[in-house]
Image: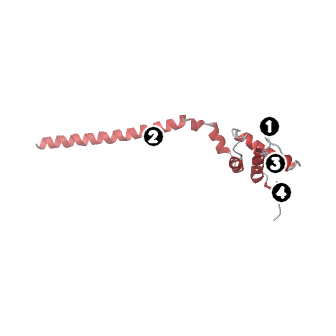
Amino acid sequence: MPKRIAAAAALIAVLALAGCASEGSSEDASTERSATSAESSPEATNPTTETTEALSAEDQGFLDYVEAERPPATSIGDMPSEDLIALGREACTQISAGVAFEDLRLVDGESPSPGGDYLDTSAIFNGALYNYCPELTPDMGS
């Protein structure tokens, strides 16, 4: 009987050690698989992700403003961020050059709303004023 207990204890010890060794291997393999998956995932090489990370605080603030303020029926909904940013900077350039606020047109083919306003242009222009050229904001008096 003592030999059986000793043999059983030895077998349990061997199995426990083998189990610990294989746990470490599977963890290492799992970590390796995760690292490999991350390297080959679309997010790791997605140019949109890289572009988003490269945006300045000004650009991000501008895009957030335009997103929040553009009308539901808009012609700029699918416009790439780079194009919106270029239009925002163009708004500052035009106003600096003397174009009157009411004459500013930024979006090709935009029609006025029933009230006569160019809502896409307004969203872009106001976002530009807040983020790119606040010095051009008209003084409305206090």
Q: Which residue is mark 1?
A: 109
Hey, what amino acid is under mark 1? Gly
Closer mark to the observer between disc 3 and disc 4: 4
State which tag comes first along the sequence, 2 or 4: 2
Q: Residue at x 69, y 44 (%)?
A: 72
Above or below, comparing residue 53 to residue 142 in the picture: above
Q: Which residue is mark 4?
A: 138
Asked if marks 4 and 1 touch (Cβ < 8 Å), the reply is: no
Q: Secondary structure at mark 3?
A: helix
Closer mark to the observer between disc 2 and disc 3: 3
C-alpha span from label 2 to label 3? 50 Å
Closer mark to the observer between disc 3 and disc 1: 1
C-alpha span from label 3 to label 4? 13 Å
State which tag comes first along the sequence, 2 or 1: 2
Hey, what amino acid is under mark 2? Thr
Closer mark to the observer between disc 2 and disc 4: 4
Q: Which residue is mark 2?
A: 31
Query: In x, y percent, where is residue 43?
Result: 57, 38
C-alpha span from label 2 to label 4? 57 Å
Q: Residue at x 57, y 35 (%)?
A: 42
C-alpha span from label 2 to label 1? 53 Å
Q: Residue at x 25, y 40 (%)?
A: 14
**Image quadrant in which the N terminus is located:** top left
**Farthest residue, direction right:** 98
Which quadrant of the figure has residue 139?
bottom right
Above or below, comparing residue 142 to residue 55 in the picture: below
- Graded by Cα atoms within 10 Å as few (under 14), some (14 to 19) or many (20 or more), the crowding at tag 4 reads few
Q: Is residue 102 left or right of residue 56?
A: right
Q: Which residue is mark 3?
A: 92
Asked if marks 2 and 3 touch (Cβ < 8 Å), the reply is: no
